[in-house]
Amino acid sequence: MSSPDRVLGPVTLPGRSPQLPDRIALVLRDRILSGELRPGTFLRMDRIAAELGVSHTPVREALQSLRAEDMVHAVPRRGFVVAELTRDDVADLFEVQADLTGTLAARAAERLAPGDLDRLRVLADRVTELAGSTREDNDPAELDPLVSAEHRLHAEVNRVAASRKLAWLVGRSAHYLPAHFYTGSPAWRTGALRSHAELLDALGATDPDAARSAMRRHVLDGRDLLLAHLDAIGMWTDPPT
Amino acid sequence: MSSPDRVLGPVTLPGRSPQLPDRIALVLRDRILSGELRPGTFLRMDRIAAELGVSHTPVREALQSLRAEDMVHAVPRRGFVVAELTRDDVADLFEVQADLTGTLAARAAERLAPGDLDRLRVLADRVTELAGSTREDNDPAELDPLVSAEHRLHAEVNRVAASRKLAWLVGRSAHYLPAHFYTGSPAWRTGALRSHAELLDALGATDPDAARSAMRRHVLDGRDLLLAHLDAIGMWTDPPT
DNA sequence: TGCCAGCGAATCGTATATGATAGTGGCTGT
DNA sequence: ACAGCCACTATCATATACGATTCGCTGGCA
């Protein structure tokens, strides 16, 4: 029995909600963005299915999702290959994301209704609180609340902005960030709290321009951190063979 | 035997290349964007599969693709619903697309290598030629060459721009145009030929700013036409019941 | 020695089968 | 008569099965 590749002890899939394909996609995204799966690597459905302890049907769907995100390419009758990803690509994605997110913030400032600001404050406070309980551990299960608090804050801004498709486009490019990367970084935390404060001030003052630039900076700070990280782990160096 | 719904004579799926799910997605996209399938409508996999004469597996994958494009939403154990789409949404998508495409054109101008311009001229001439052979018929099979010529021209610009992810983002929002809409419109044809000429001039002169604005205008012209069309067919009026 | 043909293994793409879950209508008891 | 419960149906989600295609290898021939 040729033991296929590695530890294939059933990898616990994150989350227990439905949508098995989504959870598989999450795993694969992380592996690609962590550099574990290099561009050009073929992703074999059978192996992934065996490793995760599922059938290949949901794996195929997960790969289709990743294809829609341009993280893998489909070669008809051959399977799926991890797509090229250059440093410039990442920079571009964040540039666009900064623009879009900035626009959303500006619109939120224009459309702010009574009560919206209170809701945003509550969410921002929650982020502050979780970020303050400084643990240096990297246990994803522990950091998850911070991730989702940050996510909820941005989601609320988007809701107020009432621009569904822009929010969707942001979401697309946002998949290119490893989920737990930011929250583990102390530098990100302090910067984020400052950006959030600026954003709320701008929204409170109904100042679209200020809201836009606060958001832009927030995203671009994240870009810088991520690029530095990817540089450090040698993401762009072609593996020897 | 309850005859399911309608004419279910096997709808001929466009194209005969592999990737059955893609072809199904194409059909569904057209139906959504043509207003045939209204927001809120539940898409039943079995019906679609039966109508198209395929099993429900590829249908499900097509629906997942549409979900990744935010054209439908997945309701966990309930299926897929056609997503809301407002006039502002469409306008936003084109605004973003204009920016992105403009940036791509500008970069193409900066990176233009010897020979690139010739290739672009050939492709543009091909578009002109096909657009000139004015037929007013709406037979999709006949218009296809013009669609794909236009597509190849833009693809070449993107290739020269060498910005993979930007091109990908453009592609995402571009799925929101009914494929055969433009080429059937005489107004679009004349405008497009003018825009193409301007673009090539700008590229030839290595003038990024001119290239950007030519492209922007090209896209925004398309937006205006599409919005006028969607207004005309009553896309935004909620159906009586 | 190098190249082409044919065979076999591996892998994808689609179809079919099975299990799980939510919605619906009828029945019963009060 | 009405409310609550139960069974039934429709539908999705995942697993399994099957056919089709591609790639790599081996063996023969120039």
Image (cartoon, coloured by chain):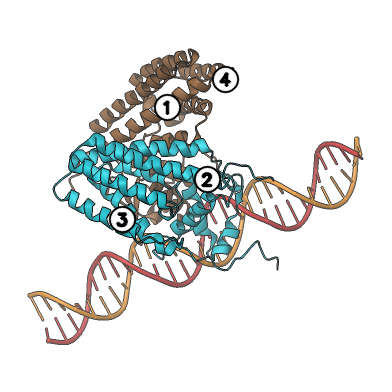
Chain colours: A cyan, B brown, C red, D orange
Foreground mark, 1 or 2?
2
Q: Secondary structure at mark 4?
A: loop
Q: Which residue is mark 2?
A: A230
Q: Chain of mark 1?
A: B
CB of mark 3 within 8 Å of CB of mark 2?
no
Q: Which mark is residue B113?
A: 4
Q: Foreground: A205 or B159?
A: A205
Q: Give percent across and percent down for residue A232.
A: 55, 46
Foreground mark, 2 or 4?
2
Foreground mark, 3 or 1?
3
Q: Is residue A67 above or below residue A27?
A: above
The quadrant of the image that shows the N terminus of chain B is: bottom left
Task: Name the N-terminal-most of marks 3 and 2.
Answer: 3
- Alpha carbon of mark 4 to alpha carbon of mark 1: how far? 17 Å
- Alpha carbon of mark 2 to alpha carbon of mark 4: how far? 30 Å
Q: Which residue is mark 3?
A: A127
Q: Chain of mark 4?
A: B
Q: Secondary structure at mark 3?
A: helix
- Alpha carbon of mark 1 to alpha carbon of mark 2: how far? 25 Å
Residue B175 visible? The answer is no
Residue B183 visible? The answer is yes
Q: Is residue B222 above or below residue A229?
A: above
Q: Which residue is mark 1?
A: B103
CB of mark 4 within 8 Å of CB of mark 3?
no
- Answer few, some or many: residues within 10 Å of disc 1's Cα (few below 14, many 20 plus, some between 14 and 19): many
CB of mark 2 within 8 Å of CB of mark 4?
no
Q: Foreground: A211 or B62?
A: A211
